Image (tube, rainbow, N blue to C red):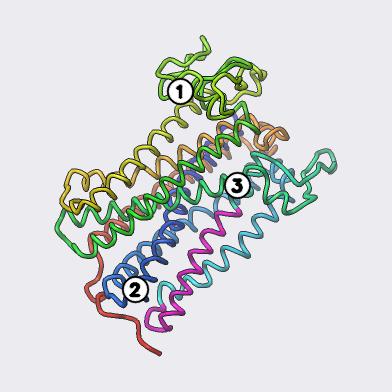
């Protein structure tokens, strides 16, 4: 066995487990701001009840996000020390900025958000909610900046250090605003809003189907639908922009995403299918010239294909192709669900359309799957590079890491993360079954 492969599996599993929680906390932060703002503006106790209920859910998700996220940074030293030495100057600044501008801000106001209902004024509590939501978004900013630098490095030069090179920042803001950072950030944030919106829709639909907490469920579903429509459309637009950036800066990844092999030829857009890697073609449904049109605005212009790259520089085609198309398919389905719900809301039949409510109950899995598949496409599609064009993944592994150590840590992390996930599902189920507290309908805001 290869310690590098085991380290990649370990990091992929732990990152996937962790990434269940940050999108929900980022998106729920936005929803909490909306519900508490409505509570302040209307003085309607229903919005107060909604804010308190979703705050309890937010607290659980935030705790699991912190617990599963800390481990990822330690792996840079244990499994990826060569990589850490190479990018330490870049990652050190980005992760330090996350700690200063995100973690301290978010955790500093979290106690007021969770426990300060009767201890601070309504406006101070609202301010704390906004700060926690901003902190969650700031955390996403710096993590995506660091990851985007790995995709499109900028604002640095290479310095010889002992027997190895390392990347050293020459322009901090060029590093931050590297070519892919802002588009990828907007796509990730909108995906987080979408995850939270469909989570709210799922819980609300569950209550409506069981004829429980009806007014609460209807109000929550309305807010969830508004966020779902905005986030779904935004994800579609930013996803297109992200693909255009990939075509410019990582053409091998785009070729793998579409199974496009000719070195330079007009390219069809694959709707679905299977890549026949021996015959170097896609078996499935394609739209001739459409990829060329999306990239260049002209169906006859060539798109760089996999044949333009040596085999050693090509990403794994089949998994990237399937992950990308599954992500797009799920995303289009979520857009349809969001707009169908908005249309039925307008028609006044949404809350009685039981088949759609059942779909919403399970649609909570859609954004989670799309987010995971999107990151899988980005990271596997970047291979064989860990820093695109600068360092290969096989060269980034800790030289002293043994197969036994990698296997042991992989087994331990898998066991611990599965236990945490089971605990999360159990606690989440308990909170949802309990539902919003009746006492929360009483106005908890006291004039001070």
* Residue furthest front in the image: 298
Residue that carries the numbered disc 3 in the rendered image: 75
Residue 308 image point, x, y percent: 66, 18
* Secondary element at image label 3: helix
Can you tell which mark lies on residue 39? 2
Disc 3 to disc 2, how far (Cα)?
43 Å
Nearer the N terminus, badge 3 or badge 2?
Answer: 2
Q: Nearer the viewer, residue 402 or 42?
A: 42
Q: Using the image, determine if residue 299 lies above or below residue 199.
A: above
**How many residues crowd mark 2 within 10 Å: few (<14), some (14–19), many (20+)?**
many
| Quadrant showing the C terminus | bottom left
Instruction: Give the label on residue 149, or none.
Output: none
Q: Which residues are magenta?
A: 116-142
Instruction: Name which quarter of the figure residue 63 lies in.
Output: bottom left
Q: Please name the residue that numbered disc 1 is placed on.
A: 270
Q: Main secondary structure of the magenta part?
A: helix
**Residue at the spot 35% in from the left edge and 86% down from the top edge:** 446
At horizontal 29% and vertical 80% (from top left) the residue drawn is 443
Q: Of residues 243 and 103, which is closer to you in this image? A: 243
């Amino acid at each position: 066995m290869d310690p590098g492969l085991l380290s990649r599996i370990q990091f992929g599993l732990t990152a996937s487990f962790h990434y269940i929680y940050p999108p929900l906390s980022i998106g729920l932060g936005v929803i909490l701001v909306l519900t508490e703002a409505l509570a302040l503006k209307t003085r309607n106790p229903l919005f107060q009840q909604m804010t308190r209920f979703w705050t309890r859910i937010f607290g659980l998700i935030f705790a699991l996000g912190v617990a599963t996220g800390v481990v990822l940074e330690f792996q840079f030293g244990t499994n990826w020390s060569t990589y850490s030495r190479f990018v330490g100057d870049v990652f050190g600044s980005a992760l330090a900025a996350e700690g200063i501008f995100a973690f301290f801000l978010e955790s500093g106001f979290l106690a007021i958000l969770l426990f300060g209902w009767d201890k601070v004024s309504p406006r101070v509590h609202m301010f704390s909610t906004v700060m926690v939501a901003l902190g969650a978004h700031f955390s996403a900013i710096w993590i995506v900046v660091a990851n985007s630098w790995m995709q499109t490095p900028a604002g640095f030069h290479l310095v010889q250090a002992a027997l190895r090179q390392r990347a050293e920042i020459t322009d901090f803001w060029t590093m931050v605003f590297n070519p892919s950072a802002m588009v990828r950030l907007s796509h990730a944030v909108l995906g987080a809003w979408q995850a939270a919106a469909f989570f709210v829709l799922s819980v609300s639909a569950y209550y409506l189907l069981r004829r429980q907490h009806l007014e609460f469920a209807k109000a929550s579903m309305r807010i969830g639908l508004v966020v779902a429509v905005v986030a779904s459309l935004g994800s579609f637009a930013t996803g297109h922009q992200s693909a255009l950036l990939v075509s410019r800066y990582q053409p091998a990844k785009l070729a793998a995403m579409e199974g496009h092999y000719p070195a330079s030829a007009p390219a069809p857009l694959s709707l679905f299918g299977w890549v026949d890697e021996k015959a170097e073609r896609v078996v499935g449904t394609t739209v001739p010239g459409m990829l060329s049109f999306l990239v260049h605005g002209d169906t006859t212009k060539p798109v760089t294909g996999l044949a333009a790259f040596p085999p050693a520089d090509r990403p794994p085609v089949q998994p990237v192709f399937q992950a990308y198309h599954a992500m797009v398919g799920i995303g289009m389905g979520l857009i349809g669900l969001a707009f169908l719900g908005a249309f039925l809301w307008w028609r006044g039949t949404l809350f009685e359309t039981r088949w759609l409510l059942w779909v919403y109950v399970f649609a909570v899995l859609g954004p989670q799957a799309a987010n995971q598949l999107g990151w899988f496409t980005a990271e596997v599609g970047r291979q064989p590079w860990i820093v695109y064009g600068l360092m290969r993944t096989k060269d980034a592994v800790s030289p002293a890491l043994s197969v036994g150590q990698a296997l042991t840590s992989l087994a331990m992390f898998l066991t611990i993360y599965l236990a945490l996930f089971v605990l999360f599902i159990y606690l989440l189920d308990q909170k949802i079954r309990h539902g919003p507290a009746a006492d929360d309908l009483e106005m908890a805001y006291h004039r001070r």
